Amino acid sequence: MPNPNPAAPPVNVNFGYAKTDKVRFEKYGICTTNPDQAVDPDYASFGLSVLSQNLGQCPLSLIDNNGVLYTLELKSGPPYPYENAFGPNTHAPIDCSGNTPGTPGAGWCDGIFAYSQKPVGRGPDVSFVITPAPQQPPPTPR
């Protein structure tokens, strides 16, 4: 008998930074603007499965080690464009309106993209949301 309430397709949210960056994400939140989950520095990502009709009530949030808050929402669920690169099509599923214009969060959000890809072999498509690292301070002169 088919499941009358199937789960939404999963999305892997990957956030960029290196463990050696001066500014790094420390916590993330799913369906909240108050990040409450510690980031694993060896695996800076999390899985997400939210039904499309609930996406507008599910902000994703991150906070960095300087206390700067970053937010995004997904306008749609997968599948996303089959293009593993930032561009107008892959940025279109991202809603950055939770960030105040001109803030680090707004600039960060403008670089996020979402894409799907066909699996190798059998199985469902896999989908990703890729975020950039937080803005880093300028390098110190030598």
Image (cartoon, rainbow, N blue to C red):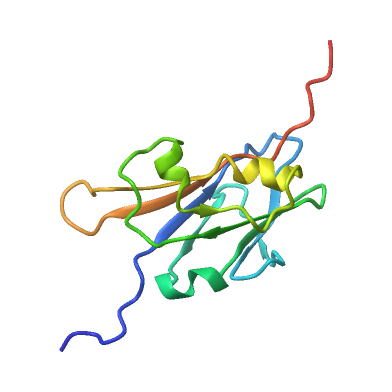
Query: Which residue is pictured at 38% across the width and 63% down the height?
Result: 10
Q: Quadrant of residue 21?
A: top right
Vertical arrangement, residue 99 with respect to residue 141, above or below: below
Give 120 or 2, whichever is nearer the viewer.
Answer: 2
Query: Which residue is pictured at 59% across the width and 42% down the height?
Result: 110
Query: Which residue is pictured at 44% across the width and 36% down the height?
Result: 87
- Number of marks in the rendered image: 0
Q: Quadrant of residue 133?
A: top right
Vertical arrangement, residue 108 with respect to residue 10, above or below: above
Residue 129 percent location from the top left of the image: 47, 50
Name the quarter where the C terminus is drawn.
top right
- Answer with left or right where residue 131 lies relative to residue 87: right
- Answer with left or right where residue 58 lies relative to residue 7: right
Residue 71 percent location from the top left of the image: 65, 56
What is the residue that sits farthest to the top in this orientation?
142
Vertical arrangement, residue 15 with respect to residue 73, above or below: above
- Answer with left or right where residue 95 lies relative to residue 114: right
Q: Quadrant of residue 6?
A: bottom left
Query: Which residue is pictured at 69% across the width and 67% down the height?
Result: 36
Name the quarter where the N terminus is drawn.
bottom left
Residue 74 percent location from the top left of the image: 50, 59
Give 129 or 80, whichever is nearer the viewer.
Answer: 80
Residue 54 percent location from the top left of the image: 48, 75
